[in-house]
Amino acid sequence: MNVAPAPGLDEALARRLELHPQVALRPEPFGALAYHYGNRRLIFLRHKDVVRLVEALGSHDSLGSALSACGIAASRWPSFVTALQSLETSEVIRER
Amino acid sequence: MSAESLVSQMKFGLDAPICLTWELTYACNLQCIHCLSSSGQRDSRELSTAEAKRVLDELRDLQVFYINIGGGEPMIRRDFFEIVEYSIANQIGVKFSTNGAFIDRPKSQQLASMDYLDIQLSIDGVDAATNDAVRGEGSYAMARRAMDNLAEAGFGPFKISVVVTRHNVDQLDGFKAIADSYGAQLRVTRLRPSGRGADSWHDLHPTNAQQMQIYQWLLANGENVLTGDSFFHLNALGAPLPGLNMCGAGRVVCLIDPIGDVYACPFVIHDQFKAGSVRDEGGFAKVWKQSELFLSLREPESAGACSSCGSYDACQGGCMAAKFFTGLPLDGPDPECVIGNAESQLLKVPAGIAPKPAMDHSKPVTISRRKPASV
């Protein structure tokens, strides 16, 4: 069964995002640890694909092209959009 | 990955500590009766400035995000600012603990001008009587003066750090009010029987009824109060407190002491928990990644005497240091087990058998005043 795209998915995929300049990523066996030097918060990235995507965001024109470039299947995009929303709330990533 | 599986992942250790505690000196102007590191006098083997910078280079390469600097009183070191500035310039944030003795107005201005720096001022009472009984005469006024200076200099939200004892449990709201009055953040941590704390433990550690009081207070205030996740032994009382419910010793945290020895955590300065030295070949990284002690701490633990207790998953058997320095087996209940499983065990510990800290830098006791007046 085809899942209808979540409302706003196209808008989300068109956004230009980047790793927050005050955030450092450190690879770990489970994914990565992100540390925000501004608000001093520690955030766990619990999937290696999310880590690759976050690192790639800044060098692509849109979230959609970053997802494609990372070889992430389109069926998984909605869940990545959700994951990135939470990372944006924690200021791990931001709009360019 | 759920929070629970993340915790199990972290139990196998991280590639580098998330943060580590670095006691810069054993020298201290105070002689707090619960001092974890039995500080007082400087150790002549203290790391030099150049050695400290080499350690920081290593921590930068390992991507340690920040360090907790303590002591002794770290600001006693003449190269204190040099070390802090070097750390920050290498993208290692600094949080340092101080009694405030050296935070005068000019120093406050200097501190306020630095980024990526947190300050944690220690008080253990909301009034001089309660505080000074533990931290020494005049120490309350000294800490409040430092807080006033930092606030006046516009430092921003510093932290006020409190060790919860039998004598200040009722003051938790008061501490919060003091913190709020400065726009500061309150941090409360658990008392450990480590260092001189072994001698004062029986007089200072909270009673069973007070454990419940602390738990309730943290449940009500926990989101706005830092705890260093140190109260996880209380989780056996019900809903878990916010934070990481596990002992991070050798897995996500460790201690570098003033002479460069690396211990599993700040509360276990004892040979049994010494993993190596930053002065060894291979430096800190080798100690973190390869020391036998740290590798063994990352192995799955046995619940031991706690395996039949339904609360083990909640409290994880409590604090390793608290057990060790009260003479309890490491695979048994915490001395402050809220279920009451430690009481009979503690009675079985023969007097004098509990391990003593590896080193004591306490200042010699002044006995002159006790001498008879006649000559």
Image (cartoon, rainbow, N blue to C red):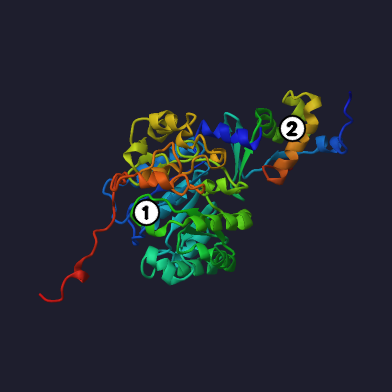
Q: Which residue is mark 1?
A: B197
The quadrant of the image that shows the C terminus of chain B is bottom left
Number of callouts in the render?
Answer: 2
Residue found 36% across the figure and 69% down from its top: B137
Amino acid on which disc 2 is placed: His
Q: Position of residue A75 (x, y in %)?
A: 81, 25
Q: Residue A60 shows which numbered tag? A: 2
Q: Residues within 10 Å of mark 2 (few under 14, many from 20)?
A: some
Up the image or down, A27 lies above or below B208; here it is above
Q: CA distance from mark 1 to mark 2?
A: 56 Å
**Nearest the eye: A45 or B104:** A45
Q: Residues within 10 Å of mark 1 (few under 14, many from 20)?
A: many
Q: Position of residue A30 (x, y in %)?
A: 60, 30
The quadrant of the image that shows the N terminus of chain B is top right
Task: Determine whether the residue tagged by mark 1 lies in a helix, strand or loop.
Answer: helix
* Left or right relative to A81: residue B283: left
Chain of the residue on which disc 1 is drawn: B
